[in-house]
Image (tube, rainbow, N blue to C red):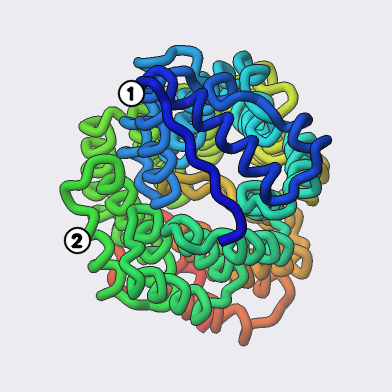
Amino acid sequence: MLAEEQVTASGKEQVLKALSEAAVELRRKLGESLSTVEKFDTPLAQATTPSLEALKAFSLGAKALGGGDYTASITAFQRAIAIDPNFALAYSGLSANYGNLAEGSLALENAKKAYELRERVTEREKFAIECAYYVAVTGDLEKTRQTYEIWAQAYPRDAGSHFNLANLYDNLGQYEKGLTEARESFRLSSEESLDYAYLAFSYSMLNRLEEARATAEEALAKSLDSPSLRTTMYPLAFLQNDRAGMAEQVAWAAGKPGVEDVLVVMEADTAAYFGQLGKAREFSRRSVDSAERAKKREAAASYEADAALREALFGNADLARQRAAAALDLSRGRDVQFGVSLALAFAGRAAQAQQLAEGLVKRFPESTIVRFYYVPTVRAQVALDSNGTAKALEALQTTAPYELGAQGNGGFGISLYPVYVRGQAYLAARRGKEAAVEFQKILDHRGVVCNEAIGALAHLQIGRAYILQGDTAKAKAAYQDFLTLWKDADRDIPILKQAKAEYAKLQ
């Protein structure tokens, strides 16, 4: 026993005041300097809430968030705010949860509210609130990174700054740095399911699949199960060709509001990856229905956008436009609008795609991903539609620092699309060597692309690149890889028909 402090409150309304006083006295007994005791002396009631009941609800929400149960966490944080509408940290917690559930607009709304109330909190919590604001509202990732690093320096034993830095580096495509931060976060706080889930995710981004699986299995062995862990284990099972493992995660999520839709849309992407488009459409329909039942309107829209993009890539332009319209009817959130605009660009609706993309710049003028990833990618694909190969390649120059980043969430993956479009631009310019380099990037980053459609299509596209180089042997091998993946594919998919015709000419 190093120190002890006991206090008695005269009533429930005095509990937080008594607790604050006890904490200050305990800090003194433990040897903290008088200067830092005085510097960090925000009363608990001011830093959080004057309501004991609101604080209790917040604590339950924080525990659920750490446990990776975002839906339960939202309910608890909403109760805390209902009791105390000025509870800044509860708004920040809601923003984090909504972001994890692909409800970007609600994440933005709550991050703004927390930011407006940030003067009520301690310095540590102010860092978290400001970073949440930069991520959800402005999208300025450089400012976010700087703030996280200052936070880590000011509070070196705080796992939160390292956890969020890991996520940021993954968004930027700096996966080694992301893993370093994830490991540090795990070292400082490894008793929550979310810590295990993100460490496993970080390993899988680097194709270190055995380490990812061992991390996930350790969490299960410690009874640290959660939706976040299961949504990490599904793509891991996919990457290891473990169909039973994928089915297990889907079965676990069945009937669970807020998580069922994520696993079902992952099933849709997996079906599409193997060319089983009919199955993919049915899974997409079910995921949208499940999301809407869980009141996840923007997530439902993202699943429609995902379906639209898939149809466009496979050559079904009319169906792509239908799904794109359905997505916009549900939401015009940032990621949804990008997914729709890119789908329309692939489907030949250049004017509408351009309009939606430019609208993103107006709405998110400071967003790193919008300015240097989303919009240039759409502009490039639009240019390709009119044979503007040079213009497409020029538009993609600004994406280079960010194009390998893991983008999208909540089951809607939109990673490495600048790379895919650049590869197509090189194909159009008949520059086979350069095209092959781009499509090889997609094949090399399998842990990032996972079951996205371009992961399968990259095999076909690199085969086309080898044809341009005159390397028939490599071209045949690439086409065979694609056709093997699509051996059970629906036969009426336009891009499959093209691939078979091209392959026949190589014989």
Q: Pick whichever, 428 or 76, lies toward us.
A: 76
Apparent side of residue 409 relative to residue 322 in the rendered image (left or right)? right
Spot the residue most to the bottom.
473
Pick the residue in front: 1 or 355: 1
Secondary structure of residue under mark 1: helix
Q: Which residue in the rendered view is the most extreme toward the left?
A: 255
For the residue labelled by badge 2, is the local secondary structure a helix, a strand or a loop? helix
Disc marking residue 251: 2
Mark 2 is on which residue type? Ala
- Pointer 1 with pointer 2, Cβ within 8 A: no
What residue is at 33 percent from the left and 23 percent from the top? 79
Q: Quadrant of residue 42?
A: top right
Q: Which residue is at 44% across, 58% downward?
A: 192
> Looking at the picture, how far across and down is residue 361, in whole percent?
69, 23
For marks 1 and 2, the one nearer the N-term is: 1
Q: Where does residue 322 sit, x and y in percent of width and height?
A: 35, 30
**Residue 382 visible in this rendered orientation of the protein:** no
- Rendered location of residue 221, percent (x, y): 33, 75
Which residue is denoted by mark 1 in the rendering? Answer: 79
Mark 1 and mark 2: Cα distance apart in space: 30 Å
Q: Callout 1, which amino acid? A: Arg
Between 206 and 38, the one lying in front of the other is: 38
Q: Is residue 225 above or below residue 106?
A: below
* Residue drawn where x is 44% and y is 49% of the image: 66
